[in-house]
Image (spheres, grey):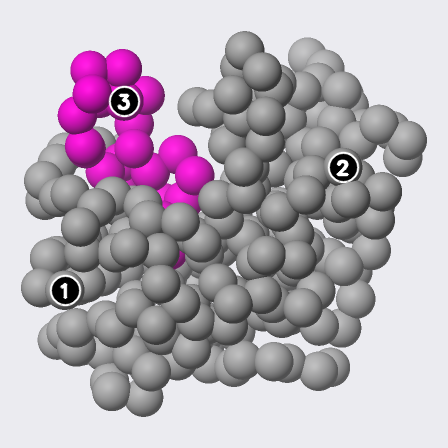
Amino acid sequence: MRVKLIAASLCVTASLVVAGLAFSNTQNNDSAVKARVTEHYDDGSPYLKLTQMSGVSLEEQREAEALLRETRLAAWQYSDIDKMKALGYKQLEPMPVNGYLHYIKVDLVKDEYILDPQRPESLLFSVDLFTEEHKLVAIMYMLGADWVDKPLPSIGGELIPWHAHLDVCATVTPEDGVNALESIGDSEDCTIGSRVEAHPMMHVWVVPHPCGPFADSSAINSTNRLKGKVACDKSHGG
């Protein structure tokens, strides 16, 4: 297997310090505000420098910076949503969630390349609900479902969290992608479609994000989003 960027194990706790501001992520249901931040620390540059933190080696810090740099430098190739659809990227959610839509190219999820900015498995777009204009905001790297029970490739140590969704049901067609999507409890049965295989994934933001450049797309919880507040949901990646 060709691995572009290597490093070991599913992150249950991840912390990020950027320009002296601390972010924290723990996989639980809390959504307390860990740090009130503004976007001035990150102007979207590929060359963002991360501040070294306790528990993260200098090598791991450099790995995280390299992944961020190479992803942002490559992102321009994926900004045209019509071209991406023509290349085989299928819409994941039936409608925008928190203003975002994921597009996934299944063939790339199944190939031998991982963490490769030239072959991103998924693209995240913000969507204007009135004009339907799409703006690329993040790349989402995905692993095949067979990785769920394996030690995951690690890069950046605790700076970069992997996560997986274990509670999703969907109906999927090869032509249209996902037609319906729902979240369920661990012991519940699907009322639509079937349970989706869990795929480890991580986001790398190509635009500034108040919860850090490796936050999940749901990192700002919806309650505080509506109130205009920055509160990073710690459930995964925030």
Magenta stretch secondary structure, dominant: loop
Q: Residue at x 76, y 20 (%)?
A: 179
Disc with the residue nearer the chain's start (3 vs 1): 1
Residue 227 locus on image (x, y percent): 20, 15
Q: Amino acid at mark 3?
A: Arg
Residue 52 locus on image (x, y percent): 17, 77
Q: Residues within 10 Å of mark 1 (few under 14, many from 20)?
A: some
Disc nearest the viewer among 1 and 2: 2
Residue 103 locus on image (x, y percent): 67, 39
Residue 85 seen in the current view: yes
Whether pointer 3 and pointer 2 mark residues with C-beta atoms closer than 8 Å, the reply is no
- Gap in angstroms between the C-alphas marked 3 and 1: 24 Å
Compare residues 228 and 44 and report the one nearer the observer: 44
Residue at the disc numbered 2: 82
Residue 187 lies in the magenta stretch = no
Q: Amino acid at mark 1?
A: Ala
Q: How many marks?
A: 3
Q: Residues within 10 Å of mark 3 (few under 14, many from 20)?
A: few
Q: Is residue 1 left or right of residue 18?
A: right
Q: Quadrant of the C terminus?
A: top left
Q: Secondary structure at mark 3?
A: helix
Farthest residue toward the bottom?
59
Disc nearest the viewer among 3 and 2: 2
Residue at the disc numbered 1: 19
Compare residues 5 and 210 and report the one nearer the observer: 210
Residue at the disc numbered 3: 225
Which residues lie in the magenta part? 214-237
Q: Amino acid at mark 2?
A: Asp
Residue 185 seen in the current view: no
